[in-house]
Image: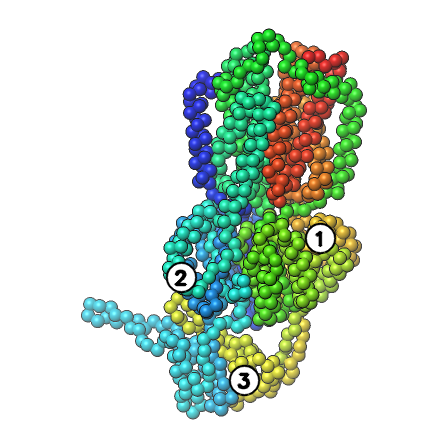
Amino acid sequence: MKIADMAIRNRVVTLVLTVVTIGAGLMAFGGLSRLEDPEFTIKQALVVTNYPGATAEEVEEEVTDRIEQAVQQLGQLKRIRESRSERGKSTVTVEIKDKYDKNGLPQVWDELRRKIGDAQQSLPPGAGPSMVIDDFGDVWGIFVVLYGDEYSYAELKEYGKFLRREFTLVKDVAKVQLFAEQQEVIYVEPDRDRMSQLGIPPWVITEELKAKNLVADSGRVEVGRELISIDPTGGLETVEQFESILLTASGSSQIYLRDVADVRRGYQQPSPKFIRYDGKQGIGIGISTVSGGNVVEMGEAVLARWQELSARKPAGIDVGLVSVQSSAVVAAIDNFVVSLAQAVVIVVVVLLLFMGLRSGLLIGFILFLTICGTFIFMGPWNVALERISLGALIIALGMLVDNAIVIVDGMLVRLGKGEDAESAAKAVVASNAMPLLGATVVAVLAFASIGTSQDSTGEFCRSLFQVVFLSLMLSWVTAVTVTPLLGILFLKPSGSSDDVNRDPYAGGFYQVYKAALVFCMRFRYGVIGVVVALFAVSLVAFGSVDRTFFPNSTRPQFMLDYWLPQGTRIEDTASDVAKIETYLQELEHVVGVTSIVGGGGMRFLVTYSAEKDNPSYAQFFVDVDDYELIDQLIPQIEADLARDYPDSLVASKKFRLGPGEGGSIQFRVTGDGISEIRRLAGEVEALMHADGGAKAIRNSFREKVKSVVPVISEEIANLNGVTRTQLADQLKIGFEGLGVGVYRERDELLPIVVRAREEQRSDVASIANLQIWSEAGQGFIPVRQVVSSFETVYEDTIIMRRDRKRTVTVHCDPSEGSANALLARLLPKIEAIGLPPGYKIEIGGEYEDGRNAQAGLAATIPMFVMAMVLVVIMLFNSLRQPLIIWLCVPLALIGVSWGLLLTSQPFGFMALLGFLSLAGMLIKNAIVLIEEMDSQIREGKEKGLAILDASSSRLRPVAMAAITTVLGMVPLLPDAFFVAMAVTIMAGLSFATILTMVVVPTLYATFFGIDTPSSPKG
């Protein structure tokens, strides 16, 4: 190709550009964004609608169903992923089609808000307004807890608000949010007996409190040339002033509020959520990075600002670190850079050993140049330095030297035959440039399906394709420009002038290889039969390979989920949590414990999904000094807690290294009748319990909960002028408390809550004696006069739906072994459950995640396979050569199957990507080999000898490429995320090299009817 001539002719420009590329690449490396895991868009939003007082079934029918109808009008909707109807609240999870990325989602959310806004008029009175939460998928790179024994929640919150204001101004910070802050409340606790004696109706207090602290516009008045505002007094400026509110009693007499009620400031009871750090209650702070920002620089900037503000930190307030992603990213990037450096060193050492000092250093330099060039283009393509992109560089290392090896090896052969360096360089590039380009394009296309997959898993791994594309294409560019120029400058012919006509492939090693090849060609059908038999056996063995979707993280932290029976008070949950914290802190190797009572935490990792709010649930984040000890700690902790807390459900698990949520095994039971789907879910749970290998077995409906139903005597209630709403308000005042207004204090709005006194509201038996105002009698009467009885019933407090159908999801995790093995045992038994018409059971969890990810690939794989086939056909302008090449691709499964089985690694998503890359490598090597055979035959060489000589000439480049790739994978073996991919490539490529160098020539001779040469002539 002329490109080589141009590079050689303008050697000064080429060398200067080479130096500039190295310098620019090193600078670009320092400026690249850094993340622990790659970003992926969580294409979900929550639509939350409150409906106070409604049962879960009323919420489902009157609110959730109507919100779902509005959502379904959205053209971009993929599915209504989940609808959760619980007492007084509806939460609908909306999932958007995969094709919409982070740039298009804001417009989708705006349209969703319009649809939800239009639906508000159809909601029942008292419901709404609905809120669309589209940022719950934000990742909070810094998650810390403020705590201090001597400080109240209000004081911690004030300091948290100060930090929020300061940190929001820091570079690369997107948002700062407080978490699990306790809401301050003004409690007004009337004396029911005193009010009854004075004849003060309860609405007198509520109306006064509602109106007293409202902002009222009194207008303005013109005074001369001025316009002066009128602002009367009368607002409440301190809590103490509440006590001086005047109430009008019967007979038009006035009394102070303090004469009939106690007024105090406190915290909302029950609290919706608590967070604790090492046993101390506090307030969480989450800090997120702007999209595409550098989390490391953001973390360093926040830390620097924290140091500047340290003088303003109140003494006694401490900060507990739940997760600081910048530190984790630095450690992860450093480890990967070390792994990358190790891989580069391994590759260069192999090159030096097998190709000589000059050749090895030259190819090693080209490798370094290609990596630097890749860094330059990663920034403009928004590729950050993270687990996937750096791993992709290591994966690509072996392929990056392929092109350079072919050029250098060809030059060495020609130099050994006496050609001058420049003509040798031009001739080698001219004959190999197009085959190498085609082979490189095919290798890139092997990764293209992951680059175009719109699934969340595909988006998570997209940088793998991006880095491979950049690095491989640059490796071809450097191979046909810089490599021949450096070969001219540094490569010297080996041997003396007497060796010019000596066959470079006459050595003993090559003679043994040629003899083996002649044997295979002579018994070609037997060899093909053996290979086919090996493939069949390996295909059967592949069925025993585990199918775990994504591996667990090596993060030195794990999660502990704790469920008490549904309906448990959050105070009781918190009491258990305090005891469990003490137990965990006393365990050896545990260095920190964060607990959240009432729900999950902030999304501090992109792969973490928080549990929905529930007062009977708590989650612990347990920090350890060595992640390898987590597998020992988890069984011990689960056994101890199950013994000490028999009413609880305990489940520990590591963090995942990929998308996914809930139990690793999930079965969804769908149907209309709640009782029937509960019964079927119970059968599924029973089978899980009977297996003995499942833990954390639970369902999304949870247990039914007791509910007290006052049966109103309609006739008596009407005679006394008591309505259902009045009864409901009085009952709420008698126990939980009724919100009647807000108290404005600077930037805070404190709810005003009227409730009975402690001694009255703590005794449920007093419900019949609650005093309610009778309009007819103008006095208080006991509730029992208008309520004929109090019934206790069991109700569903949570009703879940999926795609508008009631769905119970049964979750579990394997107590040991893989989820795939447990699923394989459970599935036949669950499929045997008899289902009534209209009911079905679907598989979710890891199985579904894997299927979705594979479906995302499958949607594009055929297109790119066809593109690869077309590229190969265009290279050869024939069908037989491409057929030979593609027949060898499935046979790589032989090495992959036994490699995964021997190392006990799963064929999950990453292994699948490894197999795709393996196919690209195999095709690339086969293309170069067959092109050389065709070339020698076109030159007139006897066909049998042409196969032998061409195979011999490609033996070293192909073997070198395989060795460098296989050994370059070694640094990835300790990495939990990449080990399955590394094993797939290492085992598959080791066998694929034999396929390429033995089976491809044999198939070539068979397909073209070429006779076996009598002897392997040199």
Q: Residues within 10 Å of mark 1 (few under 14, many from 20)?
A: few
**Residue linked to disc 2:** 313
Q: Nearer the viewer, residue 1015 or 378?
A: 1015
Q: Secondary structure at mark 2?
A: loop
Which disc is residue 816 wearing? 1
Q: Secondary structure at mark 3?
A: strand
Name the residue type under label 3.
Answer: Ile
In the picture, measured across the screen, residue 727 lies left or right of residue 911, that is left
Query: Going 43% across and 49% down the picture, which residue do you hit?
Result: 300
Q: CA distance from mark 1 to mark 2?
A: 47 Å
Residue 777 appears in the picture as rendered = yes
The percent position of residue 914, horizontal first and vertical second, equals: 64, 37
Residue situated furthest top in the rendering:
498
Q: CA distance from mark 1 to mark 3?
A: 58 Å
Q: Comparing marks 1 and 3, which lies closer to the viewer? A: 1
Query: Going 58% across and 32% down the picture, which residue do you hit?
Result: 346
The percent position of residue 270, horizontal first and vertical second, equals: 54, 71
Name the residue type under label 2.
Answer: Lys
